[in-house]
């Protein structure tokens, strides 16, 4: 019976044009990728600055592996906390102006860890409606009173805060939203949290590396300090080009998480070599501002060309540039047509995004060439006009 249920659910997804499949890539991340013996210009990667193949970052991983091996050997409280992990935490604190940093194997686990460790029965959790699935799932599973506010609606957040009864309240938003590319108004959100004695946590997975001085992220770009955003979650697998994540906070919260966060206490630590690579990626960010500038130039070029060609792009000034198509089958067909023209652009469909908002999610990087962007815009214009009428 259980397997019949599984089969039925998979078949339902297929009929709805929502079935997901992996495509095996035979090349490194980069401007060009090889899939199924065909080469594409890659407009789907979160490797926004090309650091996944930066020579300094690769060399740091190699030297780290030679010194520490390829595994950490245990959880951080047993044998899995090595000098490379300590140095990465210190680098993160210095870079971000924080007292404490704690390392996790993924942004998903970091987000869930904080919510589960901090919030108990009768506590309050309030989240932006478009927050990442890791945050939403943890909100549903935790014992706190969980509510959401309309995307980026400061007024509705104010109403939620005014009506909340718990003594311990956590508000969470993303810095840059992963499917829409827009940014949260962090200053008014922070001001509200202070007025109501609530914690503010910002998931800046898609902002760190791309925004702010030395790529410090959304809070820095919007002139906020650690006292304005008590908790930051940053990932290492996007603009930093490696993998893993960190929770940035004050020393007291760090000590609390080390003692009470089960995910941290009972998970094997990331390899020390990986920590070496992340540390070097941060140093590249700090010494090569031209990477951020090139990304900004590519974003501006894409948006100006899209407007010239009557392509309706969303209100985003970040590396994430969604083109809303609406129906899932149409978004999938457009993505396949673009593949036929040599461009790898992902079709994002429900349940990742709301029904009737399926989209092409174009992601830009510093290693895209201007001609790549020109050619992509022309291809989108042609595919849209040929298949669905002029958009």
Image (cartoon, helix red, strand yellow):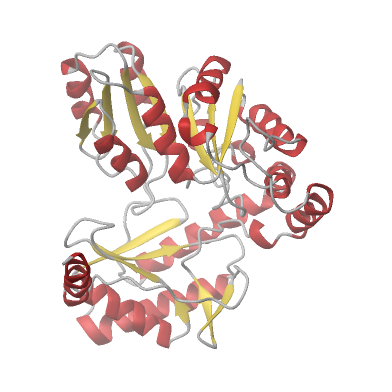
Q: Foreground: 168 or 375?
A: 168
Q: Indicate the position of residue 258 as horizontal and vertical percent values.
A: 55, 25
For residue 200, which quarter of the picture? top left
The percent coordinates of residue 383 (x first, y second) are 32, 83
Q: Residue 175 vs residue 157: left or right?
A: right
Query: In the rendered view, does 44 fall on the left or right side of 91?
Result: left
In the rendered image, is residue 222 in sight? no
Q: Quadrant of residue 197?
A: top left
Residue 386 drawn above or below residue 210: below
> With respect to residue 191, does 55 lie above or below?
below
Q: Residue at x 39, y 23 (%)?
A: 118
Instruction: Count the marks.
Output: 0
Question: Where on the picture, by quarter, is residue 98?
Answer: top right
Question: Could you tell me which residue is drawn at 67 percent across and 46 percent down?
Answer: 278
Residue extending furthest toward the front: 1
Percent position of residue 222, x then y? 47, 31
Residue 206 shows in this picture: yes
In the shown orientation, is residue 85 left or right of residue 329? right
x and y, in percent, of residue 121 in the image? 25, 20
The relative height of residue 318 versus residue 233 in the rendered view (above or below) is below
Q: Can you say which quadrant of the picture contains the C terminus?
A: bottom left
Q: Nearer the viewer, residue 331 or 63?
A: 63
For the residue pair 83 and 37, the one nearer the viewer reads as 83
Q: Quadrant of the N terminus?
A: bottom left
> Which residue is drawn at the image coordinates 63% and 71% (left, top)?
28
Residue 384 against residue 103 in the figure, above or below? below
């Amino acid at each position: 019976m259980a397997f019949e249920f599984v089969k039925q659910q998979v078949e339902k997804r297929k009929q709805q044009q929502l079935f997901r499949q992996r495509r095996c890539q035979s090349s490194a991340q980069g401007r060009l990728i090889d899939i199924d013996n065909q080469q594409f210009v890659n407009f789907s990667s979160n490797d926004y600055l090309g650091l996944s193949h930066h020579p300094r970052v690769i060399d740091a991983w190699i030297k780290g592996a030679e010194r520490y091996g390829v595994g950490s050997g245990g959880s951080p409280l047993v044998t899995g906390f090595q000098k490379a992990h300590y140095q990465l935490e210190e680098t993160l604190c210095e870079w971000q102006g924080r007292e404490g940093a704690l390392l996790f194997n993924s942004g998903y686990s970091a987000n869930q860890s904080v919510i589960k460790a901090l919030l108990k029965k009768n506590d309050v959790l309030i989240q932006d409606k478009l927050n990442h699935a890791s945050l939403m799932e943890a909100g549903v599973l935790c014992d706190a009173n969980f509510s959401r506010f309309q995307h980026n609606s400061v007024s509705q957040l104010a109403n939620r805060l005014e009506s909340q009864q718990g003594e311990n309240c956590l508000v969470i938003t993303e810095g840059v939203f992963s499917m829409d590319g827009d940014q949260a108004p962090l200053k008014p959100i922070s001001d509200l949290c202070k007025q109501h004695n609530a914690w503010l946590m910002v998931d800046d997975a898609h902002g760190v590396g791309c925004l702010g001085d030395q790529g410090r992220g959304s809070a820095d770009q919007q002139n906020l300090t650690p006292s304005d955003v008590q908790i930051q979650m940053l990932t290492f697998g996007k603009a930093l080009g490696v993998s893993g994540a960190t929770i940035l906070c004050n020393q007291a919260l760090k000590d609390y998480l080390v003692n009470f966060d089960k995910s941290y206490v009972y998970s094997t630590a990331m390899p020390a070599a990986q920590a070496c690579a992340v540390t070097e990626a941060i140093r590249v960010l700090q010494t090569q501002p031209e990477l951020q500038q090139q990304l900004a130039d590519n974003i501006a070029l894409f948006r100006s060309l899209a407007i010239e060609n009557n392509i309706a792009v969303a209100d985003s000034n970040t590396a994430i540039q969604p083109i809303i198509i609406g129906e899932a089958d149409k978004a999938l067909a457009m993505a396949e047509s673009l593949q036929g023209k040599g461009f790898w652009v992902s079709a994002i469909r429900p349940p990742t995004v709301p029904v009737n908002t399926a989209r092409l999610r174009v992601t830009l990087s510093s290693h895209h060439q201007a001609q790549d962007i020109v050619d992509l815009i022309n291809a989108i214009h042609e595919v849209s006009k040929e298949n669905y009428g002029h958009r």
